[in-house]
Amino acid sequence: MSTPYPRGFTLLIAVILTSVLLSVGLALLDVAYKQVVLSSTAKQSQTAFYAADSALECALYWDQKQGAFAYGSASASVSCTGQTFPVTTSISSNIQKSVFYVACPSGESAQVEVYKANGGATCSSGKTTCIYANGYNTCDASNPRRIERGLKVVY
């Protein structure tokens, strides 16, 4: 007695159906993985932004309340978050550049540059003071996932 359908047809349908379901499952897994990486990047970006904001606020305080970056008499150090950071200063073309780096007690860091113009010079758009703060989400400069966010204040 012969069967009207060829043998193995059910097995072929089962293999095709399993392949389709596996493909859909892998596609969903890929989308979920990309979402996890994206949300992690957003969190790290926020950490870098907060590091820049904190360093900028420190520089503003020391400039406006303490006069630490006054042209020709910049302070040798500033203190923020309970730590003291050395300030390096150079003058070129009537513009004084003061730089300090915020250390990494909790995994983030920042670099601050304060420009003070004198004698009719300006640092940006006719203003005499420019502060640039760059924040990082990690102290490891060789990390390929290191994120940098910057803020600028001009007055």
Image (cartoon, helix red, strand yellow):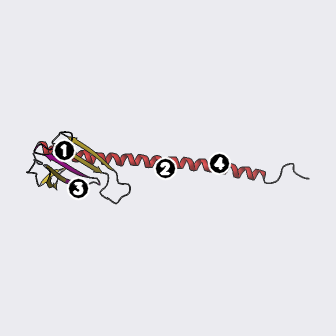
Q: Three-letter amino acid code at disc 1?
A: Cys
Judging from the image, what secondary structure is the residue with disc 1 in? Answer: loop
Q: Is residue 66 left or right of residue 47?
A: left
| Left or right, 60 with reference to 8 | left
Asked whether 126 or 153 is in front, the reply is 126
Quote the CA–CA distance across marks 1 and 2.
45 Å
Residue under label 4: 20
Cα separation, mark 2 vs mark 4, equals 20 Å
Give the numbered dot on residue 64. none
User: Separation of disc 2 and disc 3 at Cα?
Assistant: 33 Å
Q: Position of residue 105 (x, y in %)?
A: 25, 55
Q: Check the picture and name the quadrant holding the C terminus.
A: top left
Foreground tag (1 vs 3): 1
Give the class, few, some or many, for how many residues have Cα within 10 Å of label 1's Cα (few <14, many ≥20). Answer: many
The mark found on residue 123 in the picture is 1
CB-based contact (under 8 Å), mark 1 and mark 4: no
CA distance for labels 1 and 3? 27 Å
